[in-house]
Amino acid sequence: MRQRLTFILTIIVILGVLIIINSVTYVEDEKTQDSELTANRSTYHAGPTGSRALYDFLSESGYEVMRWRDLTDKLLGSDGKQVKTFVVIGRTQLPFDEEQAKSLLVWVEQGGRLVLIDRRPDEMLLPKSGDWTISTGDSDYPGMKVDPASPKEMTEGVEAIQPVQPTLLTREIQAVMPSRFASRITISGENKKTDAIEKPSGHSSGDSRKPRQNSSEPSVVTPISLAPVVHIASAEGALLVDYSYGEGRIVLLSDPYLVSNGGIGLKDNLQLAINALTSSGGLVAFDEYHQGRGATRNAFAAYFSGTPVLAIGAQCILLVLVVLWTRAHRFARPLPLVQIDRRSSLEFVASMAELQERSQAFDLAIENIYSRTRRVLARHAGVDYNSPRAEIARRVASRSTLDGYRLETLMRQCEETINGAPTNWRQSIDLVKRLREVELTLGLRMRSRDARQAAGL
């Protein structure tokens, strides 16, 4: 029992040390400063480069928002039917591959709305709009010394930018404040005049009281303009542009600082984010799969991600495996099992009693055992073997805790049985058990197996 207690206490101490070590390591990781160079744009991230403030505000304000944690091809299925706007913020932790970018653009062609907020967006996510090409120009490279939580450092030398025209994306906006690292959007291509598309009409339209049009006259349908629309710009270039792609639209905002936790509170940045994300209505989905928060990961692991719980669990499992391996592994030569001698005088007495029961000779068994017991009792009392049993019992009782009268009675019963008193095998076994108890109590010299048998009686 003491060995087991020591083992349990050792395991508890080891676990406590592991928890302390992992907790200290976790605290040190939390002290790492957030940086624009390694920005985390996830809506789960509460640091200055994250976008959790924007997501929480939209959610608390009653807008339909969600975190999209699946691949983009799921947008083409039943899961994506409710999504109206898909938002990708910043350089994602996991880059888009060709198949995922293609699936996303197919969804936009079918009427979806893609909002890209990045200084250097992926070219696969910026397709041409007719003959127009949209790209972003070079911007200042953010350094490690710039604190994204400091608006002064992020906007040093930058002036607020005003909308260039009234649109749904510039509604209630007077000016926005980008960072000094914001890029500018470049629109290039040949601006061709698109003629009206004429379709023959087989029936009239409009009020029935109006004169019917001749069925041979064509109906004029004005096509959707493919030219990008600039909403906010400065002398250096555009900051917010959107254009049509298929039946949907693509919105490009060239500075994620405008929607980040550190910059969304400046000027009308929050109103710009609301207009850009919710102007078309419906459910707004923020891409979290490419931010490293995909639903394909284990839910338990994702919940405890960034905490020492996973590391502690892995170390505990390793510790249990080591303990199991060491307890089942032999470190020395094999030893034979201990052979226990089960033979005893009582077994012999029981066997002899069964045989002697048929011949009614129980006195022989009692005589063999009692003669030895009387000899050791006389030696213990310091008298001769042939001394009266009363004297032997009295002297033994004076030197031990045994009752003299009960010892003398036992000796008398044994002698009467030896001298021919009627008895049976049960009474014989009882007398032998009582003799062994006397020897065990006095600590008289006995054979090891006799002592073990007497102790188990």
Image (cartoon, rainbow, N blue to C red):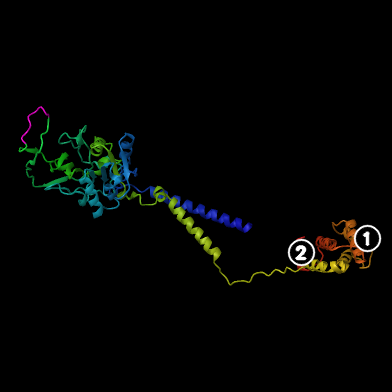
Residue type (three-letter) at the residue carrying disc 2:
Gln
Q: Distance between the residues labelled 2 and 1?
A: 28 Å
**Residue 226: percent from left, percent from top:** 13, 43
In the image, 260 versus 320, the foreground residue is 320
At 23% from the left edge and 45% from the top edge, which residue is drawn? 116
Q: Is residue 106 visible?
A: yes
**Residue 137: percent from left, percent from top:** 17, 48
Q: How crowded is mark 1: few (under 14 residues within 10 Å), some or many (20 or more)?
A: some
Q: Residues within 10 Å of mark 2 (few under 14, many from 20)?
A: some
Residue type (three-letter) at the residue carrying disc 1:
Ala
Image quadrant in which the N terminus is located: bottom right
In the image, 248 versus 7, the foreground residue is 248
| Residue underneath mark 2 | 453
Image quadrant in which the C terminus is located: bottom right
**Residue 356: percent from left, percent from top:** 84, 68
Observer-side mark, 2 or 1, equals 2
Disc number at residue 390?
1
In the image, 180 versus 427, the foreground residue is 427
Picture quadrant of residue 238: top left
Q: In the displayed structure, does residue 80 sit left or right of residue 235?
A: right
**Predominant SS of the magenta segment:** loop
At 34% from the left edge and 35% from the top edge, which residue is drawn? 60
Q: Can residue 37 be seen in this view?
A: no
Q: Earlier in the sequence, mark 2 or mark 1?
A: 1
Under tag 2, what secondary structure?
helix
Disc number at residue 232?
none
Magenta-highlighted residues: 207-214
Q: In the displayed structure, does residue 429 sit left or right of residue 330?
A: right
